[in-house]
Amino acid sequence: MSDHNNILIRVSGTDRPGITAGLLSILASEGGEVLDMEQVVVRDHLMLSLLVSLPERSTALKDLLFFGWERSITIEFDVVESDPEPPARIRHAVTVLGEGLSAMALAGVAEAIAGGGGNIDRIFRLSRYPVYSYELVVSGGDVSEMRPRLLQAAADHRIDVAIQREGLERRAKRLVLIDVDSTLIQDEVIDLLAEEAGITDQVAAITERAMAGELDFGQALAERVGLLAGLDVGALERVRAKVRLTPGARTFVRTLHRLGYVVAAVSGGFSFFVDELGSDLGLDHVFSNTLEVADGVVTGKLAGTIVDRARKADILREVAAREAIPVSQTVAVGDGANDLDMLEAAGLGIAFNAKPVVKEVADTSVNVPYLDAILFVLGIRREDVEAADAAGGDATAIT
């Protein structure tokens, strides 16, 4: 018979310096061995669990109770099974986002996980700004059962829920490729150009035909660009001045760069706008179509290879190869049908305020109007973003 007992020690109370050190010192003095340990502090309230092996005649438990009494903290004990190592189980990370996360919404998520056979091992807050978000680490369960239940909970409570396999692959993402119009920026540049040219209705009609499947992207783009013939460069410059970044775009790019990501933009729009955007944000690569201009006037033609749906996916693979990053470690972000191939090709495809057909294909979707909310899907905490901004001297530059 073993001369040691495995004891689960639960500690709770107001946190202060020295509590964990004091507890461990007592255990060490009595020959205790720490088998597992986890600590969480929520609003200065400590919750610490320790699984320890103690000699049968140890006085450590009595000493711990006295230590807790002196510091007004609660200490409880349970004897556990002799084998402390739980069986290995597949884990998933469930990220919950919303401009408000009610108890009912979180209960709906928890019920969806339980309904799929999953068990929540850990919950921690990722952010309170610009949205509330939590990450739930889930063990076991059938993801094919959990995913539809989570999607239903998201729809019922008007929140976003993402589920990803937890592990090294998730935390090894190193390249983000993002669409531009209605993703990195709030606008559709072709529509702004149509306003300048006085052809809004004609361009809208072509766009509608493309969405109905009557035209592919290349045909629709060529027809719309043809209508811009005769527009002068001054109009292009006025449109460029109107383009608005999506809220959180600068924080998104800045944070990814600090973490060592390569950040690239790909657009079915035009280099006249995308190149300057890339320079302003410090993007590593930008790809877009070239609007042909001669003698200060738009000719109505495009130059070079067209960046369409298939080309976007090719660009993802090409940039990954150039940067020596496996495609499985890439993230693609987009909103429209023209982004479907790259979302499918990427290691993680994120639909950002996207059309329904895109949400169906993407691995997950984000429907709040803040681009930096995508950071939370990647497991990045808001407090770490703000701490990095403060250290970099631009804590107020959260836009």
Image (tube, rainbow, N blue to C red):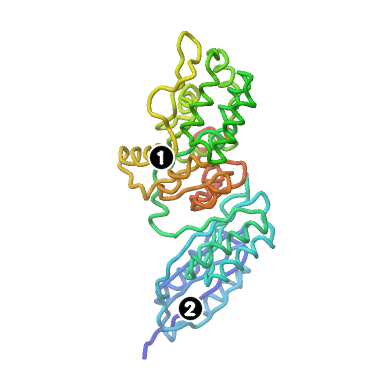
Secondary structure of the residue carrying tag 1 is: helix
Residue in the picture at 44% in, 32% down = 283
Residue 139 placement, left or right of 71: left
Tell me where residue 319 sits by quadrant. top left
Tell me where residue 81 sits by quadrant. bottom left
Of the residues under marks 1 and 2, which one precedes in the sequence?
2
Q: Residue 356's mark? A: none
Residue in the picture at 53% in, 55% down = 162
Cα distance between the residues tagged 1 and 2: 66 Å
Residue 314 x %, y %:
36, 39
Residue type at mark 2 is Ala
Count numbered badges in the picture: 2
Residue type at mark 1 is Ala
Residue 85 placement, left or right of 156: left
Name the mark nearer the viewer: 1 or 2.
Answer: 1
Q: Residue 60's mark? A: 2
Q: Is residue 134 above or below residue 225?
A: below
Residue 13 x %, y %:
62, 66
Query: Which of the two residues, 263 or 386, is positioned nearer the viewer here?
Result: 263
Q: Residues within 10 Å of mark 2 (few under 14, many from 20)?
A: some
Residue 339 x %, y %:
48, 41
Residue in the picture at 63% in, 69% down = 72
Residue in the picture at 49% in, 59% down = 93
Quadrant containing the N terminus is bottom left
Name, please, the residue furthest toward the top. 295
Q: Residue 310's mark? A: 1
